Image (cartoon, rainbow, N blue to C red):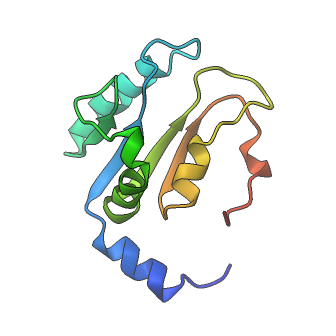
Amino acid sequence: MDPIDKDLKATIGLKSKAAAWFVSNCNTMSLREHFVKQLEEQMHVYALELDVYGDCGKLQCSQINMKGCELMLQKNYYFYLAFENTFSEDYVTEKILHALRHDTVPIVFGGANYTRFDNKP
């Protein structure tokens, strides 16, 4: 394994928030919203917060300013929830790429074989 790039190390060192989720579909076939509720409860035990942006959360990040939202993700968050609406072996949306392209670790929830993704976007 290669050592961590010093620029990436600096970026990670400035992060201050645990996890973010950008979501607009609140009732899904995958029932991801139930899993997220349980995850939030467990995070609170450790004084960690999950910031939920969009129609299903209390925070907003406009599609019009997506670049700003992605910069915020890169600057502030260690993890990003890349949770799919449905489970299918070959169904993967851009959600995982949001994390990989913005120095954030994706937490995945879906039916795809995620080992096919390279760790370099």
Q: Quadrant of residue 93?
A: top right
Height in image: 117 above or below 50?
below
Height in image: 8 above or below 20?
below
- Compare residues 69 and 81 and report the one nearer the observer: 69
Height in image: 29 above or below 56?
above
Q: Residue at x 32, y 35 (%)?
A: 52
- Compare residues 32 and 55 and report the one nearer the observer: 55
Residue 106 in picture, x, y percent from top left:
53, 49
Q: Quadrant of residue 84?
A: top right
Residue 71 in picture, x, y percent from top left:
38, 61
- Compare residues 115 and 20 and report the one nearer the observer: 20
Identify the residue at the far left of this view. Answer: 47
Q: Residue at x 52, y 14 (%)?
A: 28
Q: Quadrant of the N terminus?
A: bottom right
Identify the residue at the far front of this view. Answer: 64
Q: Residue at x 41, y 62 (%)?
A: 74
Residue 36 in picture, x, y percent from top left:
40, 27
Q: Quadrant of the C terminus?
A: bottom right
